[in-house]
Image (cartoon, rainbow, N blue to C red):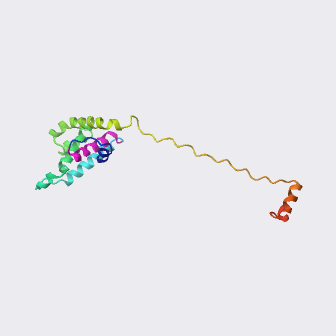
Amino acid sequence: GHALIDVYELPIPSAEEDVADGLSSYILLEFSAEDMGNIIIRDAAFDYLLTSQIENIPLSAFAGEHSLDIQRYYNLACYAYGKDPSANRDLIQAGLLTSDRARGCDAEWNQLVRAWNFHLDPNLQATGYSAPTPAPTPTPTPIPPPVIRQDSDFQERLAQSSLVSSSALRR
């Protein structure tokens, strides 16, 4: 997320860390093959869930540029659920996403998609990328073997030169 924000100088009003999470979610869920984006987002979300600390949070934790891990978990889980509720229904069934939050996930996801489509459309290709067809490797023209003249006048002159011995010519 951060790389695209920097490279395309995208206007981010605040909380770049949260925006980068949203951009990464958008890219993974919209452009990954089959359900790979959903799997990756859920893994990232569960990582935040497992590393979150919700008891005895020091005041300094609220001063960081990142949201708390538990908030990042719920945002990613909500994006995944908003994109594909049927594939992520287990989040609600297991109590990992509250029903109240899940009711708004579709709207959150659609808002995220509209925002990133608006910001990225000028920078995205209209069609899928295909690598240019490489030029064929030229086939070298074979060098014909040397033709040795068989006339006696040529062999006599060659024998008289110091380049070839007369015994080599008789073979």
Above or below, comparing residue 121 to residue 156 in the picture: above
Q: How many marks?
A: 0
For this view, does 171 lie left or right of residue 145?
Answer: right
Q: Position of residue 83 (x, y in %)?
A: 26, 38
Please give the range of residues in magenta: 14-32
Answer yes or no: is residue 82 visible.
yes
**Which residue appears at 13% of the width and 55% of the height?**
60
Q: Quadrant of residue 19?
A: top left
Q: Residue 27 lies in magenta, yes or no? A: yes
Residue 16 is situated, as x and y percent measured from the top left of the image, at 23, 46
- Residue at the image position 26 percent from the left and 34 percent from the top: 114
Rendered location of residue 23, percent (x, y):
28, 43
Residue situated in front as seen by the camera: 84 or 89:
84
Location of the C terminus by quadrant is bottom right
Q: Is residue 6 above or below residue 82?
A: below
Q: Is residue 88 visible?
A: no
Work out whether residue 104 or residue 35 is closer to the camera in this orientation and state it: 104
Which of the 4 quarters of the picture holds residue 36?
A: top left
Q: Is residue 148 above or below residue 8?
A: below
Prevalent SS, magenta region = helix
The question of residue 50 being in magenta is answered with: no
**Between 34 and 4, the one nearer to me in the picture:** 4
Residue 11, image x and y in percent?
26, 40
